[in-house]
Image (cartoon, rainbow, N blue to C red):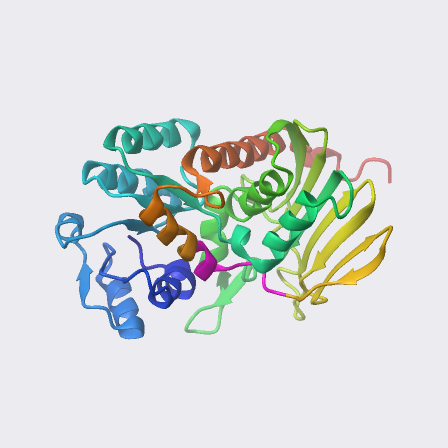
Amino acid sequence: MGCGTVALYGHIPAITEIGDLSLHAVYDPSREGLNRAQQQFGFAHAFTDAEAFFASGLDAVTITSPAPFHKDNVLACAAHGLPVLCEKPLAMDATEGREMVRAMSRAGVSLHTAFCYRFSPVALKIRDLIQTDAIGTPRSLRLIYNWNAHGRYSVDSEGRKIPNARREDRMLEGGPMVDCGTHQIDLAVFWLNSEVIAYTARGAWVDEHDAPDHMWLHLDHANGAHTMVEISYAYHHTSKVVRSEFVYEIIGTDGVIRYDREQKSFTMENSAGSHSFEFHDLKDFVGLYREFAHVLRTGHSDLLTSAEGGLKVTDIARNATDIAMKNRPSSKGKNAGR
């Protein structure tokens, strides 16, 4: 359900690659979106009417619509008794999320959140290294993702600079922590196997939106570890030469694991020496769908994020953004002290 960007580059190609799954039908209220997807992938069943979509004979549904539509899509799947894999953020707020979880539970079908970062060979290797005490006990995580969110401006047909719609939509839906920061929060819980018990956040406003376009989130875990997430949609957002930062750093009592996407490096330093691992991208939609197929066969998964887990992550991201907005510094004092 939904034929936007993430469906076209991530979900649909992965479904078509998994032997245990077949793409039976696609729904989108926009005929233009459906046509674009059909031209690219050639599937037969495409619907702008949701009831016709559900009547086509489905076993499960993936929801890749914009976040404000997740609730209605999930409730419709619950009404038709279909298990769901739903893109993040799972819901717009906790009230919506709880309603979605209750509806799927009453229907007796599964609901999982589609955190594709978990399935990268890098993320799974880090989890294995932590579980085997390769760096001792992890005490501090630094997860950094600073980028331009496709740039502040795009160019219209007359060559004029206009606000970039893709970036604007991300900011209106909650900003960088709600959009992409949820991946980092989920990974911290996944790697540490420890829930978040307290958190605080700060923001910076490079552009004029309600939500900060640069944020810092500090998470305290039940096991005593601490995670810092830094994420930006304003990093080089007007630069001619665009740069980004994407780093995982896990600091333990006997070493450090470090992944740097821009440097294409994945290493560990511990008391035994220096170790280099095979570099991989940070996402893996194919791995995500292999696990979804496993869930549909067995009803169980140790790797997919549950609906409840996805809801906790979304709550943290949205509440943290609200905290940052509440504590937004006043611009009246910007020249003070000069």
- For residue 242, which quarter of the picture? bottom right
Say which residue appears at 53% left-offset and 59% top-offset.
283
x, y (%) of residue 147?
A: 62, 57
Q: Would you place residue 118 above or below residue 279 in this image?
A: above
Say which residue appears at 24% left-offset and 37% top-offset.
78
Residue placed most toward the observer, 295 or 282:
295
Residue 234 can be seen, yes or no: no
Residue placed most toward the observer, 210 or 83:
83
Residue placed most toward the observer, 266 or 43:
266
Task: Say whether residue 111 is left or right of residue 82.
Answer: right
* Magenta part of the chain: 280-288
Q: Is residue 303 magenta?
A: no
x, y (%) of residue 305?
A: 47, 42
Residue placed most toward the observer, 92 or 74:
74
Q: Would you place residue 251 above or below residue 329 in this image?
A: below
Residue 263 can be seen, yes or no: yes
Task: Say whether residue 59 is left or right of residue 239.
Answer: left
Q: Would you place residue 161 above or below residue 322 in this image?
A: below
x, y (%) of residue 72?
A: 27, 39
Q: Is residue 286 magenta?
A: yes
Q: Would you place residue 301 above or below residue 108 in this image?
A: below
Q: How many marks?
A: 0
x, y (%) of residue 222?
A: 65, 27
Task: Say whether residue 334 is left or right of residue 239.
Answer: right
- Quadrant of the image for the C terminus? top right
Task: Say whether residue 228 is left or right of residue 123.
Answer: right
